[in-house]
Amino acid sequence: ATEAEEKDLVIIGGGVAGYVAAIKAGQEGLKVTCIEKRGVLGGTCLNVGCIPSKSLLNNSHLYHQILHDSKPRGIEVGDVKLNLQAMMKAKDTSVAGLTKGVEYLFKKNGVEYIKGTAAFASDHEIKINLNEGGETSRVGKNILIATGSESTPFPGLEVDEKRVVSSTGALALEKVPEKMIVIGGGIIGLEMGSVWSRLGSKVTVVEFLNQIGGPGMDNQIAKDAQKILKKQGIDFKLGTKVVSGDSSGEKVTLEVDSAKGGKPETLEADVVLVAIGRRPYTAGLGLENIGLELDERGRVIIDSQYRTKTAHIRSIGDCTFGPMLAHKAEEEAVAAVEYIKKGYGHVNYGVIPSVMYTYPEVAWVGQNEQELKEQNIPYKVGTFPFSANSRAKTNLDTEGIVKMLADPDTDRLLGCHIIGPNAGEMIAEATLALEYGASTEDIARTCHAHPTLAEAFKEAAMATYSKAIHF
Ligand code: FAD
Ligand code: NAI
């Protein structure tokens, strides 16, 4: 048939933003199509992002711990060997299980899934170049752009995903590089740098700013994180800008300059990871055909209900405003479908947690100390070190602190910053507290099980208005 089928909602992109919106729309009884060109669902997050990186982080940590941290625990091990291929296979198995799971959820919720590349033919019609060859199209009463992001290239240094890699290549190296340089000390640089450092690579992170961690991390916590990662063997060159790179020789070389104008230097490595940020991806969508605008950073321009200036076309996830995080994309997906179906939806952008899955993990939610200072917002601080927490002590895992920021008059929680074991799980408690407008006294008067790491969270809350008991 040449007549395009009409749907209530046509979604472009099957990443976290697109697939969650598709499932939610199916649950709400909408006739929905999701178009994905990758050949698998789950987008960056499931295929080349959150999931494969966490698999390698978990297993490289176990390997590193067995090598360097088993004797004091009374465990003597023989020959410990790395089987990189098997480690990669474990990663691939986790990814495949999860992407197939999403496909199952599509079927269960009546979502039509088309494997192909979508572009706007008009503001209601989407043309699709099918992966298997041929074309089709769909007409959408509503259309959702959820095309995600891509790694920002470094000018003059071409990514071949073997010697000059983006995060995608760094998730699939065939052998451990002797020396690796990471351009950019943000989250990707530190997570992937940690993986290869633990597996035996000599890793140097070159960061333009004077602080690691990327935007959002509390200054004090970022300093602690750097100290701990340095102890683990990662070298840092802060306040240093990579000016140019060359991969034509036997080694990849980088020209670096002190950001303050010190003397230039040449660095060389077997593998260079480019991790200088990500940018929205909307290439080939034909936005110009329908007069849709991008901002100066390439983000799809939307209003508070995710509508572009053509109201039935909405956009969510990495290709539009806000932090490029999977859970943010997921919240927006549910809200956008609710706007379509019911006329209202909601995401609280002040309460989106961030987690860096290094060892120890770093996690935060709400405002950090430097932001409160900049905005002249009065605050008080309560901290509690894991070295005084009974569970951390029994686990021989005492690095890190919980830091809480609270309103000096009302004790209302303003932000929470954790570096320590299981910080990524513990931040959920702070997120809930912040969402409900809890005071630190509310938190501290809530009974926490003993012995748990979460008691450090409770005691940091106590320390904002009184004194912690165990420190
Ligand atoms: P994407 O996941 O990028 O999905 C967009 C999809 O649209 C893609 O699959 C693409 O193929 C498809 N597409 C694009 N154009 C078209 C078209 N014209 N037609 C059809 N299909 C199209 N976030 C976290 O919260 N936690 C983490 O631990 C984390 N780790 C990460 C680790 C790495 C190495 C990276 C790179 C990212 C990580 N992120 C993490 C970020 C997270 O992956 C993104 O925020 C998330 O994937 C955004 O979802 P999205 O659906 O908006 O975009
Ligand atoms: P980022 O923005 O976090 O960090 C990039 C860093 O590179 C910055 O600190 C910047 O100052 C530095 N930089 C830029 N140009 C440079 C140069 N020429 N020389 C030296 N340093 C330079 O970006 P990153 O790490 O690439 O990650 C992108 C996004 O992916 C994150 O912001 C996050 O949204 C998402 N992500 C989330 C994860 C998580 O939630 N655990 C894990 C991985 C990625």
Image (spheres, helix red, strand yellow):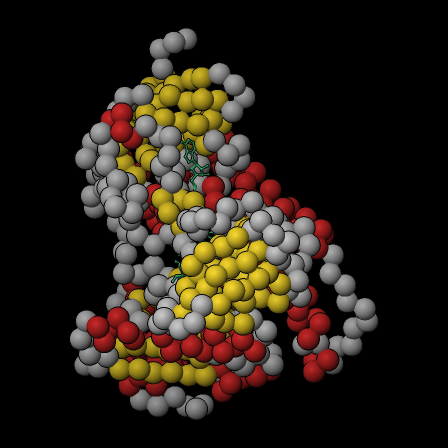
Task: Give me the residue at 54% from left, 40% from top.
Answer: 99
Quarter of the figure with the N terminus: top left
Q: Is residue 344 left or right of residue 362?
A: left
Q: Nearer the viewer, residue 42 or 341?
A: 42
The image quadrant of residue 176 is bottom right
Task: Give me the residue at 59% from left, 60% from top.
Answer: 269
How far across and down, in percent of the image, does residue 408 sit? Answer: 21, 81
How far across and down, in percent of the image, does residue 78 sit? Answer: 82, 71
How far across and down, in percent of the image, does residue 317 sit? Answer: 35, 45
Task: Give me the residue at 45% from left, 90% from top.
Answer: 470
Q: Is residue 85 left or right of residue 298?
A: right
Task: Determine whether 402 is above or below 259 in the image.
Answer: below
Task: Determine whether 356 is above or below 342 in the image.
Answer: below
Q: Nearer the viewer, residue 438 or 356?
A: 356
Q: Nearer the viewer, residue 140 or 157?
A: 157
Q: Quadrant of ligand 2?
A: bottom left
Residue 306 visible (yes or no): no
Q: How many marks?
A: 0
Residue 130 visible (yes or no): yes
Task: Give me the residue at 29% from left, 47% from top.
Answer: 297
How far across and down, in percent of the image, does residue 135 sit? Answer: 45, 17
Quarter of the figure with the C terminus: bottom left
Residue located farthest toward the right when viewing the structure as drawn: 78
